[in-house]
Each structure stands twice: as structure tokens, then as C-alpha cells.
Image (tube, rainbow, N blue to C red):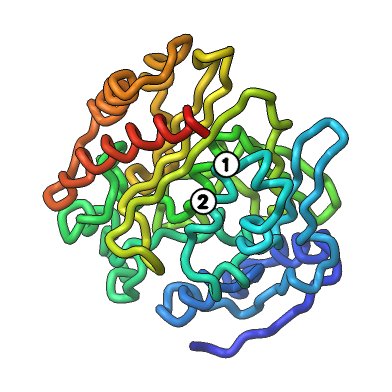
Amino acid sequence: MVSFEWVDATTVEQAAALMAAANADRSVVVKAGGIDLVDLMKEGIVRPSRIVNLKSVPGLADITVEDRGGVTVGALATLSQIEMSEDIRTRYPAFAEAARHAATPQVRNAATIGGNLLQRPRCWYFRNAHFHREGVDIAAAAIAGENQYHAIFDNSTSAMVHASTPATALVAYDAEVALTNGRGLVRTVALKDLLLPPDASRDRDAAIDRDEILTSVRIPAFRPGTRAAYHKQTERDSYDWPMCDVAVVLHMDGDAVGDAAIVLGWVAPTPRRARESEEIIRGRIITDDLAREAAKAAVRDATPLSRNAYKVPMLEAVIRRTIVAASHA
């Protein structure tokens, strides 16, 4: 690990301005919880000359219920704060569950929602400095190599999957993020549009400008009659990355589904909406047979790689169970 300068930012604008001042001779990164950053530095993937600490900026860890009913979660709110927040647990249970099932209690106490959403892929090719050499195509190496944990959708260019479990639930809730620049200007972007397919040539996998800081996540107002569920499938019960995860949000119209969002994580480069499945259950009463039909439709276009075909029936089962669980929530 190389030496670096440490700056405790006092405002978001200061942090964003420091990021904007970076150039080819001086790499600058921001630190929230630091979980992913420290990993990347230890692995030799990131070698910053300056680290800007956001923990010293006041107010970025607040969770606020708005007058209009939505909830704003500061970018430095930890996953533990989110899973224990009564406001989030009662209004957005799938989000709370996704936060609760991420990593371990020790990691959740430090990891922030902003850092979690902006973390880099957990692909072992991307995480190995040996592959970060001129002429090496990391995406191609993953597609052709040990790809058992990689994408089964949209994987012709990059098979790396997005590493955030809360992102799966937040996309299902139509969440948006606030991005603040060095002049204090704030722009709002839907989370589904913020997340980009992983690319080893970029320093982040998000549609965020160099002089912008992710400052908060906002979830729209809770709608009466909304039901939701989240499920993460792993090989072990704890401290394990998902093989897939699914979030289902149902807006009920009496006993039938008025509208639905079914989002699949860890099976594509970004969280994937199962729109055909949503159409199948819209306007109908959820039954086991209907959930099974919707789940089959969700995996119909899967293009598994040489070692991850097992994900297809696994994902289908998890989708079916999550739809049923949401209907009974």
C-alpha cells in the first residue's frame, strides 16, 4: 500500500471540489465507511494519493421521514442504522431486509448506504491486480473463465454483477439519489439510471460526475396497500455473497395486484427488472401457480455461461417464493 494524504472534509462542497481537482498525476478518492475502499487498496486496484473523508461532514447519516411521506436516507447512514430504523422497517420492509442480510454485523456497523451502492464488482478477476495489466481484458477473462458467480443476463460484454444487495430492493421501490457538486448544486437521478454495467476501465460504475458526491437516497412515499418481500440466496447462512437475490414490491388493488416491481440482483451487470413477470401478475390474485408462471417468464431469456447454469433454476425458485411471500406480507 502506498502513502497518501488524508483530508477530513467539513462540507460536501469541499469534498466535491477536491474530487474535481484530481488529475492524471493526483488520484483522489472519497471515503465513506471505507469497507470497499480498503479492500481495493489492499488488493492493489486503487492507489490514491489523497483520500477525502466524508465521515467528518455533519448531517450525512440522518434518516428523515418527509412531510409528503417519503424517506430520505443520508449517504453515510450505516446498514445497521437502516435495518434497525422503525420508519424503514414499517414502510419499506424489503429494503430493511436487504440491509439486514448484507455481510456481517461488524461490517454493517461501518458500511454506509452510499458506499454500498457505489462499490466495485466482487469479481475475482477484477479484484486481482494480475489482471490489471496492459492488454488484459478483464471482462473477457471472466466470461471465459471461472464464471460460476457471474451474470446470466446481459452478459455478452461484461459478466460482472453489481455487488449491492440494498440496490435490488431500492430499485424495486423506485428510489432516487441526490448528487451534490462543488458549487452546492444538487441533481436527482433514479437509482436504476445511476448504476452502470461494471467496467474495469472506469473508477466507478455509476453515472456520477467527477465533481459530484452522492449525498442521500430518497424512497417515494409509502402507498397504502403496498406489500413487499426480499430474499437472498447464498451458499452459507452468513457472511457470504449472494448467488442471487430478489425484491418484490406489490401495490395491491383489493385482493389483486394493481402494480408490481420484481427486481433481480446478482444475475446481471445491474439490478434487472423482470417486466414480463410484472405484466403476468398485474391485475390478478397471487396464487402458487401464478407465481410459478411469472418466475418461469423471468428466466426465459437467461444466457448462462459455462459454469453458472445452476443459477437459472435457483433464481426461478427464489422469484416464485418471493412473490408468494410478498403477497402474504
Residue wearing tag 2: 98
Q: Which of the 4 image quarters holds residue 26?
A: bottom right
Q: Residue at x 80, y 73 (%)?
A: 56
Q: Nearer the viewer, residue 191 or 172?
A: 172
Q: Residue at x 44, y 30 (%)?
A: 262
Q: Residue at x 62, y 72 (%)?
A: 110
Left or right? Give the position of 324 relative to 102: left
| Residue 225 x, y percent position in the rendering | 63, 23
The disc placed on residue 242 is: none
The amino acid on which the numbered mark 1 sits, given as a three-letter code, is: Leu
**Is there CB contact under 8 Å for labels 1 and 2?**
yes
**Closer to the N terminus: mark 1 or mark 2?**
2
Q: From the viewer's perspective, is residue 88 above or below residue 261?
A: below
| Residue 51 x, y percent position in the rendering | 66, 76
Q: Dot 2 lies on which element?
A: helix
Q: From the viewer's perspective, is residue 2 above or below residue 265?
A: below
Residue wearing tag 1: 170
Left or right? Give the position of 262 relative to 84: left
Q: Dot 1 lies on which element?
A: helix
Left or right? Give the position of 261 relative to 189: left
| Residue 120 x, y percent position in the rendering | 46, 60
The amino acid on which the numbered mark 2 sits, given as a three-letter code, is: Ala
Work out whether residue 212 can be spotted: no
Viewer-nearest of discs 1 and 2 = 2
Q: From the viewer's perspective, is residue 259 above or below residue 157?
A: above
Q: Nearer the viewer, residue 45 or 219?
A: 219
Q: Nearer the viewer, residue 73 or 314?
A: 314
